[in-house]
Amino acid sequence: MAEHLARISPVTDLGMIALRGDLAAIADAAGMAAPDRTGIATDGPRSLAWMSPDEALLILPAPQTPEAVEALTLALDGQHALVADVSDARAVFDVIGPGAADVIAKLAPVDAAAMPQGHLRRTRMAQVATAIWRIEGGFRVIGFRSTGDYLGLILRNAAIAGSGLAPR
Amino acid sequence: MLILTCPHCGIQAEETELHNGGEAHLKRVGPDGSDEEFEGYMFARRNPRGVHLERWRHAYGCGKWFIAARCTVTLQVFGTYAAQTTTPPDHIVQAVRAARPDWNPTEEGASE
Amino acid sequence: MPDTARSGRYSVFAIAREALRQHKGWNRAWASPEPRDRYKVIVVGAGGHGLATAYYLGKNFGITDVAVLDKGWLGGGNTGRNTTIIRSNYLQDPSAAIYDKALKLYEGLSQDLNYNVMFSPRGLIMLAQTEHEVRGYKRTVYANNLQGVSTEWIDAQRLKELVPIINIDGPRYPVLGGLYQERGGTARHDAVAWGYARACSDMGMHIIQNCEVTGVETEGGQVRAVNTSKGRIGCEKLAMVVAGHSSQLAEMAGFRLPIESVALQALVSEPIKPCMDVVVMANTVHGYLSQSDKGEMVIGGGTDHFNNFTQRGSWHHVEETVRALVETFPMIGRLKMLRQWGGIVDMTGDRSPILSTTPVGGVFVNCGWGTGGFKAIPGSGWAMAELVAKGRPGPLAADFGLDRFREGRFIDESVAAGVAH
């Protein structure tokens, strides 16, 4: 029988910092380019994602997180801004494989195949909130840790061999 | 399936990613209002068969509120705009009138 | 055939008589007259509630100078679109009173109307699938027993005996027990409208279909007439009984209602052999299920969460309802669905109906039954007839006035009603 549509693997070594306030000031403080609307800008091991008109998410290797929180808090001192380490509140999965777009499309009301590089789509997968963006060979999906088991289950279920969306 | 474009993030979101917040442009009645005014603000709704200006929240997306101009009979969407406005903007009024020439946006304030 | 003919009494003798003359002697069940210039009472809306209002105006108050107008065909709105469930297990006293009055009237309705409405008191169970629901329904049982409405709490084993096709230990929606009303059940929805229509017509009332009301004429704050697609028709009193479009009619009379209209969906499967002889409601998952006399599995779904007059529902609600029901009733996973439809329901803030006088003299409103008006038809008509005849509400309607919204006297049935009334 055919291969699974994609390999679903949990990612556990990422840190995430939620940043609210003026996005230009936040990007400045993070030392990164400000992402476009619904964009995600990557610079080396760090990515800065546009989450809403007043919210960004800094994604970075987990060990760098405490230091980054400290630096950002210092840099944004005196401004109306929020810096919160949300790493432990998140569950992350990589969906890698030739059928990765099918896996996403089955679960989210998103045309995954047409999703451009550098775009972050906040949406739902089945019944839980997620954000999705392209990585090498597929997609990265983040959700809430409280629904992480469910998210892993539905992703693996959607990737079952022989369940591709193309007409057979 | 209803599809609305969130004016804050530009995403074409479908109904299941959105949360409806009811009639838009209601004028809040505070502690100084009479019982009748407060009742009107809380409960009396236009509930039109036709063009409806209504609040939506992009719940599974950027989380922001916006307002949609939509027909409740045909589900035609005339446009969306940010919630931080007290009256429908000109481009929305024009878009509605292109399809419904008789539509009168000043009636929208009548629910005060 | 003259349009004013009485329909004649239905009986075994009538069947025998007609059998001997090739069934040529049956009259029309109701007449289709042209409207007169004026009536004492005009009821707008020839659905179950409107026709029942007219019927009890004649039966209880001797008022037969009545016209029932409908913009479409008789019983073509929500009366013909609901899932025919009848129950009276509500939490609040005013609700239990009017819904139980309706249930008691349903019990004798076929005899009363001389028309078989196929009332089937097959029993009704509301599933408790969360601890929250267990507590909620036990509370309702206590309340019902104090109200004189017989309901009981049953455990999952008893429930399984009553509903053999149910899966009580589903992983996501386990069945922890249920609220059981043995007197609850179903009736043939069309027949309820037809039976009332026939009885009204036999009393000399006019049922005028394809007659859309386009305006309400008032003078000095008092109703004088309605303008319709068949011309102006004068009246002393006007009863608005037009679920789904109550706001539109109220606007014609110059007032607003605390109502929003949304689409509620239902679907029905291919007919299968008898497999379930009770009505089961699963309010956590927004689904309810019963088997019709024809064998179809009748499934009620959720409401769209936005104002909507399309009489269609959003597709994802079907998916949500069926996804949950398939776990609780695994056998329906093999069924083909034949039809899916929607109806426009009036929603009030407290999920309770409105039976009320209005700011316009002589105008009375009956609306806001939300997703569950069918079960209330006889009680609603009974209470509305008293309101219209006397000009003030009787004991059944007293708590359902419009003034409750101003005064904060809500009759909160959002739990008892859920989405699935």
Image (spheres, coloured by chain):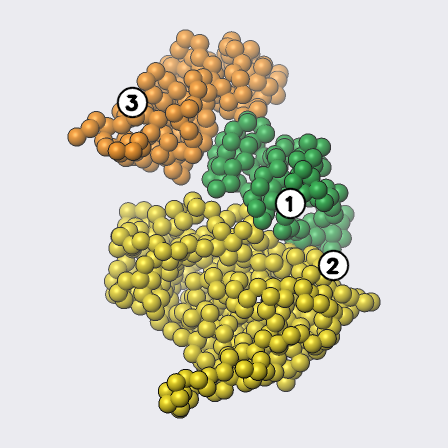
Chain colours: A orange, B green, C yellow
Give the label on residue A81, or none.
none
> Label 2: which residue?
C254
Question: Same chain for marks 3 and 1?
Answer: no
State the SS at label 1: strand
Tell me where residue C272 sits by quadrant.
Answer: bottom left
The three-letter code of the residue at mark 2 reads Gly
The three-letter code of the residue at mark 3 reads Pro
Tell me where residue C348 sits by quadrant.
Answer: bottom right
Q: CA distance from mark 3 to mark 1?
A: 45 Å
Q: Please state the horizontal and vertical placement of residue A126, each as a whole percent of the image.
A: 38, 37
* Residue at figure coordinates x 49%, y 19% from the top left: A39
Question: Same chain for marks 2 and 3?
Answer: no
State the SS at label 3: loop
> Label 3: which residue?
A98
The three-letter code of the residue at mark 1 reads Val
Task: Assess disc 1: are there few (<14), some (14-19) or many (≥20) residues with their C-alpha within 10 Å of its C-alpha.
Answer: many
Q: Please state the horizontal and vertical placement of residue C111, each as a whole percent of the image.
A: 45, 84
Q: Is residue B51 above or below residue C345?
A: above
Please state the chain letter of the residue tagged with numbered disc 1 in the rendered image: B
Q: Residue at the right extreme?
A: C220
State the SS at label 2: loop
Q: Please state the horizontal and vertical placement of residue C340, each as a whole percent of the image.
A: 42, 54
Evaluate if marks 3 and 1 touch, with contact meaning CB atoms under 8 Å apart: no
* Residue at figure coordinates x 28%, y 31% from the top left: A164
> Label 1: which residue?
B51
Task: Assess disc 3: are there few (<14), some (14-19) or many (≥20) residues with their C-alpha within 10 Å of its C-alpha.
Answer: some
In terms of depth relative to the viewer, which is nearer, C197 or A140? Answer: C197
Q: Which quarter shows the N terminus of chain C?
A: bottom right
Q: CA distance from mark 2 to mark 1?
A: 19 Å
The answer to whether B28 appears left or right of C202 in the picture is right
